[in-house]
Amino acid sequence: MNQKKVVGFIPARYGSTRLPGKALRPILGVPMIQRVYERVIKCTSLQEVYVVTDDQRISSVVESFGGKAIMTSVDHVSGTDRIAEAVQTIDMDIVVNIQGDQPFIDPVMIDEGVQPLLDDDSINMCTLMHPIKNEADMHDPGIVKVVTDLHGNALYFSRSLIPYPQKDFAHSVFEHVGMYVYTKDFLIKLAGLSPTPLEQIESLEQLRVLENGYKLRVIESKCQNTEFHGFNIDTEEDALRAEAMLLERNLK
């Protein structure tokens, strides 16, 4: 029986550039961070779940609906750094970084990302991907693409189309799902590394892992309804679309 302790963390800051206070933005009357939290706690592989934030307003809302919140420094530039501070005082083996702006995340996707680290002690970090079906999404820089080697480890992440179809060869283009699973030790090590050139050029912090020569396992998610479960909220228009998606599915 595997005794590794797995803990989920949802980073949430108040000062979002495009939608300030979006963690508290109501989606059909329910704060977005509450919708994320209530999806995440359904995941069978997590023993505990915390929201990590730099804002007392978010912490208070989380505690009001029965969630657990950890206050962290206001100086962190990324969710990874915020979580790395939070894990220092918690006894665990595996850390799951869950995006705080995906209110409909499928708990099964979290299990998919955790399982490789439970099965193989040589894997320090894992993330997910799924095939892109919409042609326009392949050319959208807001949708991050990933390519892997023959063993399922990431070769590169980019906002550009990869691989570029120079020849007519049957292949899929994969979108990266921004959920990360790490060993606790590896996360702390990663947060201590300086930003790398490609990371800064593409504005993709996962490239820091590859540029430093570490492996990052990428699992193809079996989640079918990625349009819904993978939906991100970055703008007010996204929030309105999220509400419409719930109503379309007769959900609340």
Image (cartoon, rainbow, N blue to C red):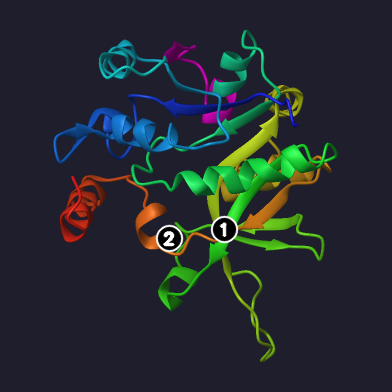
Q: Residue at 71% x, 23% y: name it.
A: 93
Residue 232 to residue 3: above or below: below
Circle 2 crowding by C-alpha within 10 Å: few under 14, some 14–19, many from 20? some
Looking at the rendering, in which quadrant would you find the C terminus?
A: top left
> In the picture provided, is 210 more to the left or to the right than 244?
right
Q: Residue at 76% x, 23% y: name it.
A: 185
> In the picture provided, is 23 more to the left or to the right than 194?
left
Which element type, helix, strand or loop, lies under badge 1? Answer: loop
**Quick check: marks 1 and 2 in contact, CB under 8 Å?**
yes
Image location (x, y in percent) of residue 57: 27, 14
Badge count: 2
Which element type, helix, strand or loop, lies under badge 2? Answer: helix
Of labels 1 and 2, earlier in sequence is 1
- Residue that lies at the very extreme toward the top in this rendered image: 89
Looking at the rendering, in which quadrant would you find the N terminus?
A: top right
- The amino acid at mark 1 is Ser
Between 164 and 43, the residue placed more toward the observer is: 43
Residue 123 to residue 146: above or below: above
Residue 195 to residue 115: above or below: above
Span shown in magenta: 69-82
Quadrant hosting residue 35: top left
- The amino acid at mark 2 is Thr
User: Which residue does the numbered mark 1 point to in the structure image?
Assistant: 221
C-alpha gap between disc 1 and disc 2? 9 Å
Q: Residue 115 carries which label?
A: none
Image location (x, y in percent) of residue 163: 66, 72
Circle 1 crowding by C-alpha within 10 Å: few under 14, some 14–19, many from 20? some
User: Which residue does the numbered mark 2 point to in the structure image?
Assistant: 226
Q: Residue at 37% x, 48% y: name it.
A: 232
Q: Residue at 60% x, 52% y: name it.
A: 128
